[in-house]
Image (cartoon, rainbow, N blue to C red):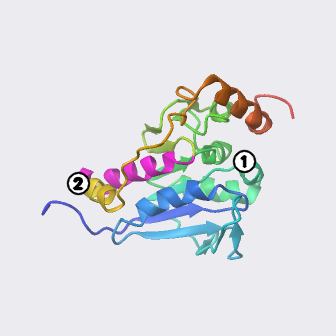
Amino acid sequence: MSSVSWMGDEQIAMLIYPGMTVMDLIGPHCMFSALMGAKIDLVASSLDPVTSDAGVTLIPTATFQSCPRDLTILFTPGGTDGTLAAASDSETLAFLADRGARAKYITSVCSGSLLLGAAGLLNGYRATSHWSCRDALAGFGAIPTDARVVRDRNRITGAGVTAGLDFGLSMVAELRGRIYAECTQLMGEYDPQPPFNAGSLRTASADVRTAMVEMAADFTRKAEALAGLQQN
């Protein structure tokens, strides 16, 4: 334990925007907040409150202008229509491209990788996303990869929603080492024991897969259109 780097000085910027999926943010934020000494900013275009797709409202701590220029981690959460809107917003994409040009790690969870792709930050990199839009990443020059957490050099992306916990814990290990990460896992009592085995397309029943793929079809189409894989 004497060799563990308990204190650090990481600069972490987590993008927030209207309509994002709050769990995409909170899972990683919970893990990042265990990094003693780290500074975490919730970054938006202004300091106005931001309401997620679940109705949870968050208060930004920094704007695109006031966010530190040199970051340890640049992070984007996902969502559905809110994500598509953010990924089409020139101010948001300019912020991501600028900070991403210098960030030590460029990261996302769920469809947040669409934002990274739209900002030109995933070209030539393996990346993952929510299953409903993972293949759309190819339109941004990324290599869609079916895994819970995908690392390609300094690009680290998580799959859908709850994968943010795995992603966040992986980042803690990356920054402070395995022992620190395991201590974080124990303190959070992160010991998943889901009541059902339907958390991925591989394990869900055919009926469940069919229902959810059909429900997500419109978002899938819009994500592919955003990435230039099909016409609107």
Where residue 209 appears, as percent x and y from the top left, is: 65, 28
Nearer to me, 22 or 43: 22
* Horizontal arrangement in the rendering, residue 136 relative to residue 168 (left or right): right
Mark 1 residue crowding within 10 angstroms, few (<14) / some (14–19) / many (20+): many
Task: Give the residue type at disc 1.
Answer: Thr
Q: Which residue is mark 2?
A: 179
Q: Residue furthest right?
A: 232
In percent of the image, x 61 and y 46: which residue is there?
116
The answer to which quarter of the image holds residue 44 is: bottom right
Look at the magenta stretch and give its main secondary structure.
helix
Where residue 85 appears, as percent x and y from the top left, is: 77, 52
Mark 2 residue crowding within 10 angstroms, few (<14) / some (14–19) / many (20+): some
Label at residue 32: none
Query: Which contiguous range is marked in magenta?
Result: 161-178
* Horizontal arrangement in the rendering, residue 41 relative to residue 35 (left or right): right
Closer to the chain start, of discs 2 and 1, is: 1
The answer to which quarter of the image holds residue 181 is: bottom left
Task: Give the residue type at disc 2.
Answer: Ile
Q: Which residue is mark 1?
A: 80
